[in-house]
Image (tube, rainbow, N blue to C red):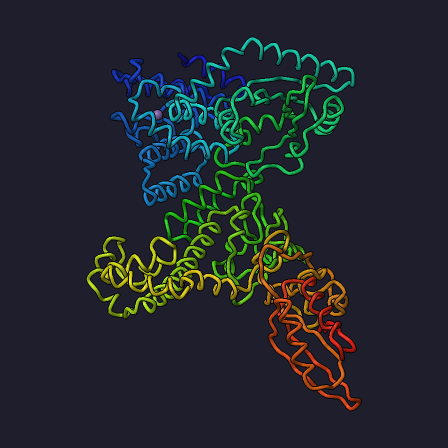
Amino acid sequence: MIRLNDILDQVSQYNPEADLDLIKKAYVFSAKAHQGQTRRSGEPYLVHPVAVASILADMKMDISSIVAAILHDTVEDTVATLEEIEQLFGAEVRKLVDGVTKLGKIKFSSNVEKQAENFRKMVLAMAQDIRVILIKLADRLHNMRTLEFMTEEKQVEISKETQEIYAPIANRLGIQEMKVELEDLAFKYLNPEMYKGIASQIEKRKAELQSYIDEVKDLVSKKLQEHHLPGEVSGRLKHYYSIHRKMEHQNITLDEVHDIIAFRIIVDDLSQCYAILGLIHSLWRPIPGRFKDYIAMPKANNYQSLHTTVVASKGERVEFQIRTREMDEIAERGIAAHWKYKEKGAIESKDETKFKWIRQLLEWQRDLNEPAEFMDTVKLDLFTDDIYVFTPNGELRELPQGGTPVDFAYDIHTDVGHSCVGARVNGRIVPLRYQLHSGDAVEIMTQKNGRPNKDWLKFVVTSRAKAKIRQYIRQEERDTACTIGRQLLEKECERYGVSISKLLKSTEVSQYMQEINTKDIDGIYVAIGYGKMMPLDLISRFLPKEAVEAVEKKEAKEHVPTTIGRFVSKIRGKSSRGLVKVNGISDVLITFGKCCNAVPGDAIVGFVTRGRGISVHTIDCPKILASDSARTVPLEWDTSSGLTRNARIKVICVDRPGLLSSMSEAITDQGVNIKEASARAMDDKKAINIFEVEVRDTAQLRHVMNALEKIKGVIQVERVRS
Ligand code: MN
């Protein structure tokens, strides 16, 4: 149990000039107010506010915060009033106690609307005085530490709230120590079996792990000394929650989680950080992709450190974090480390700008009417580190890490997102899946008839973009299903000699509509289009069995292919997308340049047009050679598409009757359609014929040309590009 003297000792250590009498006075006041009250653990209630004050003293908070922490439950739970508190402890303490009391009344329910409203209040409180949130976090931490005395139902409820709201806030404020402890405690109650499983396994290996920590610590310390690099090495087991997340994320067992120990090296100045990093990398092989320089690129919550994972002597993975004392201080205490306890009131303005996201949240919540949308934005913001990019007008936009031009487009407007076909970053064309960096200037190219692509879902990171793309695709698929369904039903009705309008008005069909829970006919078409039912299922409800059988018998005699088979081949033939892949993505909006008229098999390149998607050209097309190379993108054919292209062939032959028909025959013999043919006689008894043919690829085109060359009377065959 923590006593008053412990807190006085703590405070006077980091703040020798502190007015300890005020803390003593608060203690006496709180003890009196809470007299006779006990906690569920059976301890006197006073234990709680004192423990909360101690957590804040650990964070080296100012006297007002410590005093307010000791008093934080008096107004809510006792007869004490805010006026009394102001009289005895001043207006500042009153304001803090008031803020914590109000915040305490907020219950974060699962109801989205309410949650959003509550969150808004929390943000407001933060913007007024962030110390209110720090006291609330300390309060929550102590409650989580003593959660075992609550009912199971309460444990789950409080833990959920902690995981969803408080831990992310602690993270956003950079209070790492508190964040991991909150997460760990919440994990313990939300997933007790998993927690116990990890705990017991770690317990079993404790001695082994400890000796391993000592071994590495000694080795690294010795190496540091050899190289005259002063640094303090420490190693610790990772928290159970982060181990659990690793297991979940990589789908592995605890034995397979190699880096359950994290080593930290604390140094005096910045240059030593990099020197030590170099030393570590010379000792052991670093794992590619695991080195993170948060010193050059601090996290949004101001966290700074170097991280690297190496393969150590026995082949095991070991993680090192290297940072200065000052960075360590900020990593552990976050915003609290910026607190100048000697000054009263607000944080230094320099630090304030670092936390301007709090104010930004306030602005957003004014713009977002949908509560769910607000929560979405806020949660995303709390859980990820952000990047900042610019619109062409120089307007700043915030996106989560990994944000792409598509996320950016949807952030601007849904329509911009839907119709985006390309992007330029800092003046250069980039693929839509390109990951933006802070400081990038992003320009979105749109096309009037553009539409979202399913593949975008693989790379977008904002929930907004995801939701909008899914919504569009769902609607589009539904529309297609509806059209297909209607046509299928029409054909099938025709086949069985049933009037479709009569069928749809029948009681059988309205009964079926009730069964599938739809109010309009479209619902039926969609069900057919999605293949949930066959048109015949519907018709056979309406038509007597004998009538259906009679039609089938008749068809069997005549070998009529089924409607569905015919229909499917028809829609396949119509499709015109997916012939070309851009960076592995098919279904891109493309047009073919009339200048070179590329056919699958030709080496091609794309040119990003203004507003007409990507135009496809052969690499030797004179037009592409003359154009801005910064706007070209590599392309490849999507050979799986099964689609065709039209190519033009010029045939010079002797002008003789009957030759045109034998040329046509030669072409169709190759299984190739002629889309258009023209012939023109010249003065010298020769004729020029132009055939436009539908081919799969250049190979098929070559076969056609070879066949033409073999015809007697043909003089020259060549492919015409334009
Ligand atoms: Mn409390």
> Is residue 425 depicted above or below 264 in this figure?
below
Question: How far from the left and from the top, in percent, is residue 580?
Answer: 62, 59
Considering every residue shown, the one lying at the far bottom of the view is: 683
Residue at horizontal 29%, vertical 13%?
42
Residue at horizontal 38%, vertical 33%?
91
Question: How far from the left and from the top, in percent, is residue 238?
Answer: 54, 21
Considering every residue shown, the one lying at the far left of the view is: 507
Q: Nearer the viewer, residue 467 or 535?
A: 535
Residue at horizontal 78%, vertical 15%?
226
Ligand 1 quadrant?
top left
Quadrant where the N terminus is found in the figure: top left
Considering every residue shown, the one lying at the far front of the view is: 557
Q: Is residue 463 visible?
A: yes
Quadrant where the C terminus is found in the figure: bottom right
Asked where in the image residue 32 lies, by quadrant, the reply is: top left
Q: Nearer the viewer, residue 519 or 370?
A: 519
Question: How far from the left and from the top, in percent, is residue 720?
Answer: 72, 73
Q: Nearer the viewer, residue 164 or 350?
A: 164
Q: Nearer the viewer, residue 34 or 320?
A: 320
| Left or right of residue 178: residue 526 | left
Asked where in the image residue 327 lies, by quadrant, the reply is: top right
- Report how many numbered discs are placed on residues in the image: 0
Question: How far from the left and from the top, in percent, is residue 190?
Answer: 38, 26
> Is residue 30 depicted above or below 376 in this figure?
above
Q: Is residue 132 visible?
A: no
Residue at horizontal 52%, vertical 21%?
254
Considering every residue shown, the one lying at the far right of the view is: 684
| Left or right of residue 255: residue 651 | right
> Is residue 596 depicted above or below 262 in this figure?
below
